[in-house]
Image (cartoon, helix red, strand yellow):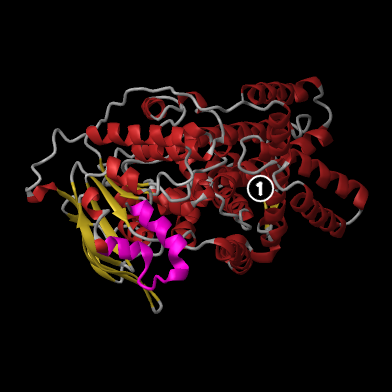
Amino acid sequence: MKRSHLIAGVVLAGLVLYPVVNPWQPYPQGVLLTAFLLAIQASSWNIISGYAGYTSLGHSLFLGLGAYTAAILALHLGVNPLWVAPLGGVVAVVVALAIGLVVLRTRGHAFVIITIAMLLAAQILAANARGLTKGSDGITLELPFWDRDYQNIPFYYVFLLLLVLTVLFSAWIRRTKFGTGLVAIREDEGKAASIGVNTTRFKVVAFVASSFFIGVAGGVYAYYLTFLNPVGAFAILGSVVIVLAALVGGRGTLYGPVVGGFLVAFLSEAATVYGGSASARVLLFGGALVLVVLFLPAGLLPTAQAWWRKRHPSVVEFTDQTGALSFRSTPSGAPPPDSDSGVLLDIRGVTKRFGGLVAVNGVDLTVRRGSVTGLIGPNGSGKTTLFNLVTGGMAPDRGSVWFDGRRIDRLPPWRRGHLGLGRTYQVTRLFKDMTVRENVVAPLPDGRWRTMFADAISGSEAARARELLDLVGLGRFADERAGSLSYGQQKLVELAQVLMLEPSLILLDEPAGGVNPTMLGRLVEVIGEVNRRGVTFLVVEHNIPLVTEVCDHAVVLHRGSVIASGPPEVLRRDPAVLDAYLGDDASPADGASGGQAREEVR
C-alpha cells in the first residue's frame, strides 16, 4: 500500500506541473480534465458499488443534478456557476438520501433496475419542466470570465482538486469501521448484520457519500460546457462508462477506479478521433465491457496484486502466541444459581415451520448467566435453526426470545448484537478478502455514529483487535488475508471477531467441526478463559467428550423438541438421548452406524 501511495504522489506531482510546463496546449489539457471527471465519478461510485457491492447503473444522475443546480442558480441569480457548484453536491446528497431510503431496501437485480429507472425519470422530468430547465432547448451559460489565453487551465486544476478530494474521502471511508462494514456487506450481508453492522444505515450513508463529489463536479462541468440539455445531462451511456472505468481499474480498491477512469477516458477520446461517429464509441465501450467481464473480472490492479502475491507468497503458520485480554464490560460476578436474575437467555415456546416441516417445535430453553451450556442432538434436530431464531437470521412462527430480561425476537440482527449477543457459524463465515485485522475490527458493539466512523486501522478499535488476536494466538497474522488461513485458524479468528462485540452471550455452532487437535485445544483454552471473565456460552456440538469437558449443563434436541436436559455426564447415559442419536427405526442393518453413534454419545 505504501508503494501505491508513493506512485500516486509522483503521478499527482506530474499532473500538477503539466500545465505549467506546457501551458499552450488546450487539447491535451481538455482530455486530461475529462479523465479527471470520469475518475471522480468512478471513485465515488466505488463507495457504494465497490465497497458495499450494490451496483448502480444510474450514477450519472448525480452529475446531471449537480449540473442543472449550478446552471439554474447561475441563470436566475446572476452568479458564476463555479461559486454555486458545491450546492450541486448538496442537492445530489438530498436526492440520494431520498432515493436510498427506499431503493436500498431492495437487493440484486431490483436495485440495478431501479437506479436505471431513476436516471431515465430525471431525464423526462428535466425535459418537461420547461419553466425551470427550458426543456429540450437546454440552458446556455456565459463563457468563462478569465482570459482566453488560459483556456482550460482553471477547469483543469478545479477538476484535479476535486479528484484528489474524492480519493482522500474514499481512503478515509475505507480505513474506518464504516468502510470495513461496507466490505462486510459486500461479502456476506447476513453475517455483517449478525456482528452489529446496521446494514440499512450503512448502505444509505454509502449511497449518499457516493453522490456529493459527483454533484459538485457536475456544477463545474456545466460551466465548462456552457450548454446543458436533458439528454446530455442524464445519459445512460454516462453511467455505463462510470461502471466500465471502475471495472477496468478494479472496483473495491482505492486507486483502481482512478486508473480505470484515465484509461477509459483516453480510449473514448481515441474512439472519437479515429472512430468518426457516436455509434463507434458505443460499440467500443460495449466490446470493452464484455472483454473486461470475461478476461479481467477483478480489474487491472487486483490482477496485478494477485500476480505479485503469487510471485512473493507469505508463509502462514500456526503460532502458540498468547496474550491477556481485558474486557471492558464484564459482569462483576455471576448471580446465585437459584436467582431469577441469573437467566440470561430465555426461549419460550419457540416454533419454526418450513411448509409441512416443523424444524423447531415449541422449544423452551434457558441459559444461565456465566454458564457454558451445551445444545446437542442428531443432525436435523433443529439446533442451527434455533440459533438463527435467537440471533435474528429467521423469525419464529410462534413463541418469544428474551435476552437479559428484554424481548428480542422482533429486533433486527444488529440490534441483538449491540445488546451483547454474538455467534459463530458451523461453517466459518469470515470475510475472506479482508485482512484478519479488518475481520476482527468490523463488528460494532453499539449503534453510535462515533463508533461507526472510528478508525479501524489505528486507535482504540485497532488496539482492541490486537488484544483479541493475541488472545487466540493469531496476532502475527493480522495483515494476512483471512481466506489464506487454515480452517482451524479461521474458527479462532471468527471467535475473536465475535468478542469484538463485547458480548455477554456467545452462541458457538459446532466449534470443533473440521478443526485439528492442536487448534481444538487452543479453542477450548480460549472458551475457558473468556468464560472465566464473565461471558456466557451456548454451544452446539456433536463431539460429546468436548461437551462433557467444557459444558456444565446440556440440552438435547430431537426432531425440533427438547427431550432431555441436565449435566452432560448424566445425559450421555440417558436412554432417550441414546435413542435420539440411534433413531427410532434402528434395525440390524443399521448396526454399524448405530454402534458408532452409541460410542460417540458414551
Residue at 36% over, 57% down = 598
**Quarter of the rendering containing residue 249:** top right
Q: Identify the element where label 1 is drawn.
A: helix
Residue at 41% over, 44% down = 512
User: What's the magenta region?
Assistant: 576-601
Q: Is 377 rendered above or below residue 31?
A: below
Tell me residue 437's x, y (percent).
47, 31
Q: How many marks?
A: 1
Looking at the rendering, in which quadrant would you find the N terminus?
Answer: top right
Is residue 582 something one can see in this rendering?
Answer: yes
Q: Residue furthest bottom?
A: 356
Callout 1, which amino acid?
Answer: Ala
Q: Say if the magenta span includes residue 59.
A: no
Which residue in the protein does label 1 denote? 222
Residue at 7% over, 48% down = 338
Report the magenta stretch's main SS: helix
**How busy is the neighbourhood of tag 1: few (under 14 within 10 Å), some, or many (20 plus)?**
many
